[in-house]
Image: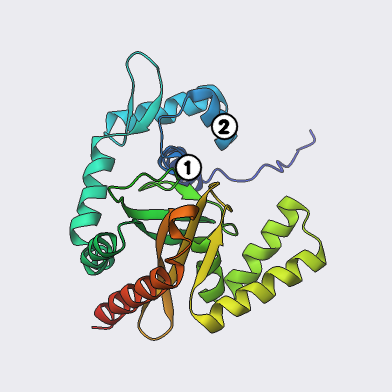
């Protein structure tokens, strides 16, 4: 009687559990990044998961309060536990504690909207946004994610981030948008100029009719952790841009000094 040898790999229960856990977190991350209620069909597209698998993960997240489903629309959004976690971050994060007062003061002095943004998992994420009393139509909102190369906030984060991270993001953007070598060289020169002057500005890059200035916030001497960004309608900012730049840089520097200790 002949014998056969099995070529199958041994069952690794721990790896299977880890993979399932990561898929659950992937679903939660997708919902958190959108900044709005999301339908299941969009989550299927974003995660690449089969709809049946996605529903299983959503049930787990709903059970533990990480997401919630609209009874009538069937859309999914962060649940009460996620909101509690976000509240705890706002109340106890050393960055948020250091920045909150300065953001409020900058809004009051400038009369414009101000946000605090950071780089997280391949996207620029708005940690905090305090809006002015004056009208401003922009896509920035607390918790919402944005791309990594357009707008003052993204450019400031790129310019002052590590060389390795900057090159990785530039290569990724070149592949996604078919940017030529010449376009990338021009963009790198722009980032070098931002480093020298200590801030970035943009107009009409993220939202039409919106001008913005962004200054880096550091922990320690060189560790970039966020950017402080002032946003204003282009027409309203024309005569005040230099004033807004000075005010934003000064506020970012004060936050950085607080984080030194």
Residue projecting furthest to the left: 91
Q: CA distance from mark 2 to mark 1?
A: 10 Å
Q: Position of residue 233 (x, y in %)?
A: 45, 52
Q: Is residue 126 above or below residue 34?
A: below
On-image quarter of the C terminus: bottom left
Q: Identify which residue, 161 or 207, lies in the foreground.
A: 207
Residue plotted at (43% across, 83% down) = 222
Badge 2 element: loop
Q: Position of residue 247 (x, y in %)?
A: 35, 72
Q: Is residue 181 above or below residue 67?
A: below
Q: In the figure, is residue 10 to the left or right of 30?
A: right
Q: Is residue 209 above or below residue 72?
A: below
Which mark is on residue 10?
none
Q: Is residue 233 visible?
A: no
Q: Is residue 55 above or below residue 125?
A: above
Q: Identify which residue, 51 or 151, lies in the foreground.
A: 151
Residue projecting furthest to the top: 72
Q: In the rendered image, which residue does mark 1 sit on?
A: 26
Q: Is residue 10 visible?
A: yes
Q: Earlier in the sequence, mark 2 or mark 1?
A: 1
Q: Position of residue 29 (x, y in %)?
A: 44, 43
Residue projecting furthest to the front: 239
Q: Position of residue 72 (x, y in %)?
A: 35, 13
Report the number of numbered marks: 2
Residue plotted at (33% across, 77% down) = 250
Q: Residues within 10 Å of mark 1 (few under 14, many from 20)?
A: some
Q: In the rendered image, which residue does mark 2 sit on?
A: 49
Badge 1 element: helix
Q: In the figure, is residue 63 to the left or right of 162?
A: left
Check contact, mark 2 vs mark 1: CB within 8 A: yes
Q: Residues within 10 Å of mark 2 (few under 14, many from 20)?
A: some
On-image quarter of the N terminus: top right
């Amino acid at each position: 009687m002949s014998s056969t040898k099995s070529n199958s790999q041994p069952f690794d229960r721990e790896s299977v559990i880890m993979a399932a856990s990561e898929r659950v977190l992937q679903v939660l991350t997708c919902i958190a990044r959108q900044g709005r209620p999301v339908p299941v069909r969009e989550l299927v597209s974003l995660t690449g998961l089969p709809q049946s698998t996605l529903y299983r993960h959503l049930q787990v997240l709903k059970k533990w309060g990480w997401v919630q489903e609209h009874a009538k629309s069937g859309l999914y959004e962060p649940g009460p536990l996620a909101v509690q976690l976000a509240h705890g971050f706002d109340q106890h994060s050393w960055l948020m504690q250091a920045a909150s007062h300065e953001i409020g003061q900058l809004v009051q002095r400038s009369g414009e909207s101000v946000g605090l943004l950071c780089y997280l998992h391949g996207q620029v994420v708005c940690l905090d946004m305090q809006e002015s009393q004056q009208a401003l139509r922009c896509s920035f909102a607390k918790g919402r994610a944005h791309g990594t190369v357009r707008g003052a906030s993204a450019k400031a984060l790129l310019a002052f981030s590590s060389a390795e991270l900057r090159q990785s993001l530039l290569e990724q953007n070149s592949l996604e948008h078919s940017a030529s070598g010449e376009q990338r060289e021009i963009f790198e020169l722009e980032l070098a100029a931002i480093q020298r002057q200590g801030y970035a500005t943009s107009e009409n890059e993220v939202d039409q009719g919106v001008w913005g200035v962004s200054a880096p916030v550091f922990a320690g001497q060189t560790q970039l952790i966020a950017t402080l960004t002032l946003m204003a309608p282009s027409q309203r900012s024309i005569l005040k841009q230099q004033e807004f730049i000075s005010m934003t840089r000064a506020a970012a520097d004060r936050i950085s000094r607080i984080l030194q200790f």
